Image (cartoon, rainbow, N blue to C red):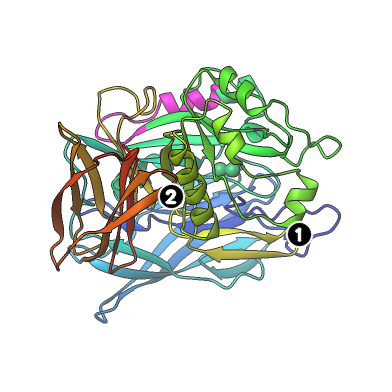
């Protein structure tokens, strides 16, 4: 995954190279009722290319034809490697629904005055920010916590990508309605124990009062059964686990440093397979020796779960879910995990499409959009394995175990996320799942009684009219 896009990588020659810092504007994709809407000006590599930002101006618009214009004089010199400058201009107040933010930046570099819209990325059409001011808090059972389980901070910093500062992620997490954030920077970007401890210290020093909790972890590159590099999410590991194989810094040797099981043992914590069926370029497979997680990799190592919902529901989600079900049916009750793999990317995702040549922009990896919701046991998330959880980008869907093989399936949505289109129960039985569609109407809230009888497990999924989705763990 490659973003925010870094364009200063020019070996041997890059069409993307500019003698300018990267300049862009970012803001959370949704704002919970009554919470602020922070908007950041992000500047990267101003230490090499100092820049003066003169002014930021633009317009908010919504579908009802309302608009708010603003002009913010900045007149400030930027000269550090990273800047995350929160901008204070007029925002829609007491007005819910989707707003579009068109924003321009006037800057001066090498005595030349320039203006760009949203970012100064070359050959990438500017897109307005889209922000959903929610009418209600995202639904969630009381006593449960919603978290981001896969994201990158500014400690992910290399020739092609960089993330947002932990404090920026924490503030954004609050606005979008998260309770915790697991920061999982790449082992090949953390490089050493020293840098890992620096990240842990910065995260440990984050705000605590009334803010989502931040937890340091690591996305470890390790070797699958074919000795290809796959990614492993470790939460709360005390010490750095090396994994430089596919970091792109060691072209002469792309072999994994540790096999999966060794990396898990070294981390000393519960570990999850990251994006098991990630779609990748042929060049990534060839030059970085990247591979996929197989059934064997998942069942022969002490894996606790699979993050097959990695920001969006594409081919990798469906293939990953199929692999998960195969594991469930053979008695391996792995937990499903939802994360976003965002590198900053609070509103949309910008990344390198073809190295040295072109960039892309889409909505596939937005910070805090897909969440993993777990019961609050008072302990640090994932310091123990949750007994129950669900993953969602909108509605709440959870199974409650009662006595005598009885379960209650709860489903909740809101006007923001839409009515239910389907609620489905899956029972794992002898080599296949039995599917039961539940009877629903226009209600935003359902409680069904279900029995598992002879099933190996029971699980559920739901989809709403706004294209939102949720699924439970198998219990
Ligand atoms: Zn990864
Ligand atoms: Zn990642």
Q: Reading the chain from its start, which is encountered first: label 1 or label 2?
A: 1
Q: Quadrant of residue 372?
A: top left
Badge 2 marks a residue whose secondary structure is loop
The crowd level at tag 1 (other Cα within 10 Å; few <14, some 14-19, many 20+) is some
Residue tagged 2: 367
Was residue 474 drawn as part of the magenta stretch in this picture? no
Res. 251 mark: none
Tell me residue 175's x, y (percent).
30, 49
Which one is nearer the viewer's eye here, 435 or 5?
435
Q: Residue at x 49, y 56 (%)?
A: 318
Tell me residue 277's x, y (percent).
58, 49
Q: Is residue 156 above or below residue 392?
A: above
Mark 1 Cβ and ligand 1 under 8 Å apart: no
210 left or right, relative to 292: left
Q: Quadrant of residue 464?
A: bottom left
Q: How many marks?
A: 2
Q: Is residue 332 above or below residue 88?
A: above
Badge 1 marks a residue whose secondary structure is loop
Question: Outermost residue toward the bottom?
Answer: 65
Q: Residue at x 57, y 57 (%)?
A: 23
| Residue 399 visible in the snapshot | yes
Residue tagged 1: 356
142 left or right, relative to 350: left
From which residue to which does the magenta span run?
Answer: 197-213
Q: CA distance from mark 1 to mark 2?
A: 25 Å
Which one is nearer the viewer's eye here, 332 or 395?
332
Was residue 207 drawn as part of the magenta stretch in this picture? yes
Tell me residue 80's x, y (percent).
60, 42
């Amino acid at each position: 995954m490659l973003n925010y896009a870094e364009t200063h990588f020019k070996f041997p020659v890059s069409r993307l190279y500019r003698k300018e810092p990267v300049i862009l504007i970012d803001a959370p994709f949704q704002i919970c009722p009554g919470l602020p809407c922070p908007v950041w000006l992000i500047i990267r590599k101003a230490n090499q290319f100092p820049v003066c930002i003169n002014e930021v101006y633009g317009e908010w618009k919504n579908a009802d034809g309302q608009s708010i214009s603003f002009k913010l004089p900045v007149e400030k010199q930027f000269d550090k490697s990273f800047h995350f400058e929160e901008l204070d201009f007029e925002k829609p107040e007491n007005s819910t629904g989707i707003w579009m933010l068109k924003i321009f930046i006037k800057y001066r570099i090498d005595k030349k005055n320039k203006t760009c819209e949203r970012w100064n990325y070359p050959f990438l059409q500017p897109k307005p920010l889209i922000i959903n001011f929610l009418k209600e808090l995202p639904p969630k059972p009381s006593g449960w916590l919603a978290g981001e389980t896969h994201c990158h901070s500014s400690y992910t910093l290399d020739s092609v990508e960089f993330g947002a500062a932990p404090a920026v992620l924490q503030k954004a997490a609050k606005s979008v309605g998260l309770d915790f954030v697991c920061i999982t920077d790449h082992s090949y970007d953390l490089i050493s124990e020293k840098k890992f401890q620096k990240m842990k210290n910065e995260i440990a020093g984050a705000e605590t009062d009334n803010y989502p909790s931040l937890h340091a972890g690591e996305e470890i590159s390790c070797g699958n059964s074919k000795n290809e590099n796959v990614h492993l999410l470790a939460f709360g590991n005390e010490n750095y686990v090396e994994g430089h194989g596919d970091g792109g810094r060691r072209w002469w040797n792309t072999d994994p440093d540790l096999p999966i099981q060794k990396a898990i043992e070294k981390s000393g914590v519960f570990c999850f397979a990251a994006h098991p069926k990630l779609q990748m370029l042929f060049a990534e497979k060839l030059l970085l020796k990247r591979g996929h997680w197989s059934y064997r990799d998942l069942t022969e190592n002490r894996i606790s779960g699979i993050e097959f919902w990695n920001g969006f529901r594409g081919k990798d989600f469906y293939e990953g879910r199929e692999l998960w079900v195969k594991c469930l049916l053979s008695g391996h009750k792995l937990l499903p995990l939802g994360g976003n793999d965002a590198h900053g990317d609070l509103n949309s995702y910008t990344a390198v499409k073809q190295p040295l040549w072109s960039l892309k922009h889409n909505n596939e990896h937005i910070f805090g959009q897909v969440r993993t919701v777990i019961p609050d046991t008072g302990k640090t998330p994932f310091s123990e394995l949750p007994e129950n959880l669900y993953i969602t980008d909108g509605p709440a869907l959870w199974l409650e175990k009662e006595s005598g093989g009885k379960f209650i399936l709860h489903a909740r949505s809101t006007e923001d996320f839409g009515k239910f289109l389907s609620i489905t129960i899956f029972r794992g039985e002898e080599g296949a799942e039995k599917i039961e569609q539940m009877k629903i109407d226009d209600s935003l809230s359902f409680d069904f009684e279900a029995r598992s009888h002879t099933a190996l497990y029971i699980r559920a999924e739901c989809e709403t009219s706004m294209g939102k989705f949720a699924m439970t763990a198998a219990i």
